[in-house]
Image (cartoon, coloured by chain):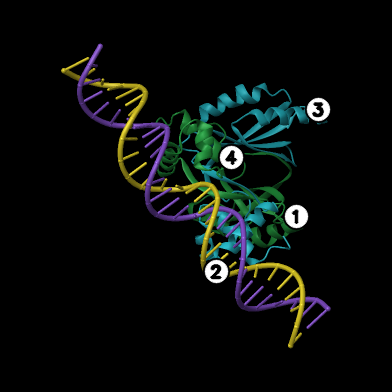
Chain colours: A cyan, B green, C yellow, D purple
Amino acid sequence: MENLDNTDLQLLKILHENSNFTTKELAAKVNLSPSPVFERIKRLEKNGYIEKYIAILNAEKLNQGFLVFCNIKLKKHDKNIGNDFVADILKIEEVVECFNISGDFDFLLKVHVKDMKAYQDFVFNKLGEVKSIGSTQSTFVMAQIKNSYGVGIL
Amino acid sequence: MENLDNTDLQLLKILHENSNFTTKELAAKVNLSPSPVFERIKRLEKNGYIEKYIAILNAEKLNQGFLVFCNIKLKKHDKNIGNDFVADILKIEEVVECFNISGDFDFLLKVHVKDMKAYQDFVFNKLGEVKSIGSTQSTFVMAQIKNSYGVGIL
DNA sequence: TTTTCCATAGAATATTTTTCTGTTTGATGA
DNA sequence: TCATCAAACAGAAAAATATTCTATGGAAAA
């Protein structure tokens, strides 16, 4: 982070929002020629500031537009139960994100399914099979206001 | 969705995980030549299944590795207060995601900051300035178990 | 001032993207 | 069964881009 100058941060911010610019276009945006821009990006990739490039898909069009946050308490708090839970959760495709959290619950899941019916099915047939789970509490998303995929400030 | 065949879904899945493959590489993966792969991807982009391509950045290296879910209750539930809240939240860069939710709270924020001290600063100086907020409750992320950026099943 | 080092510009080369043309395949109807 | 049509495909050609290379310039250190 200390080795990043303002141009690096500009490039990161641009690519974080849209990685489809050509080197020439990026060069124009940061007032450089293509070669240093190319070298900077390769350096940012090599040093791990840029982890990967991905396509963002439209969840609605892919029948995954129903979003639920599912809070989970484990049955017990020992290491084995925790490991079992993680192993099981990683296999469930509807679970898009999973966090180990502080507070009343142990884990927070972000779940993408088609609709409420599919969510009911998910809770019964998928979460229901995870033996390490003690209890769950679902919070339904009525609207998504903002999403910037990981890093806000640059 | 009905117009998508298995090859389209394969391509979406691959690109959702890594959009840096060349057309030739993708063609080999789905057992086609580059041209139909190229045409399929352009069609998926044009029809909105692929929304955009972005770089995923390393939050830790960019001093944004401290993750908090912040539950928010508004002061009142009228349209103006809600609009004010949304307008204010969109301006705060630390807020990486924002959802209007069911349950005890009105909104759920995902917040990225450097550390606990930065979070305290965020709560006092950023959220503190948002007049529409009635109360907040913070849930701290101890570990991120899984993240697949939006769509699980394909 | 001189030297050294690093980032840069600009040209070259290699790959890739994109377009185009002709062919195959599969469905439809006579 | 055969002819016809439309859609998807393979392969080659063209255009654009990514990548490498060399030389230049400017800033920091001697």
Q: Is residue B29 above or below residue B140?
A: above
- In the rendered image, is residue A37 in sight? yes
Q: Is residue B53 left or right of residue A100?
A: left
Name the amino acid, label 2: Asn
Chain of the residue under label 3:
A
Distance in Å between CA atoms under marks 3 and 1: 29 Å
Q: Position of residue A102 (x, y in %)?
A: 75, 42
Mark 1 Cα within 10 Å, few/some/many (few <14, many 20+)? some
Which residue in the protein does label 4 denote?
A: B17
Q: Is residue C8 above or below residue B11?
A: below
Label 1 to label 2: alpha-carbon separation: 34 Å
Q: Tag count in the figure? A: 4
Viewer-nearest of discs 2 and 4: 2
Chain for disc number 2:
A
- Circle 2 sits on which residue? A31
**Residue B106 pos. (x, y %):** 58, 46
Q: Residues within 10 Å of mark 3 (few under 14, many from 20)?
A: few
Q: Which residue is mark 1?
A: B115
User: Is residue A38 positioned above or below A108 on the image?
Assistant: below
Q: Amino acid at mark 4?
A: Glu
Mark 3 and mark 2 lie on one chain; the one further toward the N terminus is: 2
Both on one chain, marks 3 and 2?
yes
Q: Position of residue B26 (x, y in %)?
A: 52, 37
Question: Element under label 2?
Answer: loop
Asked if marks 3 and 4 fall on the same chain, the answer is no
Give the residue type at disc 3: Asn
Measured in 3D between alpha carbons, the distance from the residue under mark 3 to the one under mark 4, in whole angstroms, is 30 Å
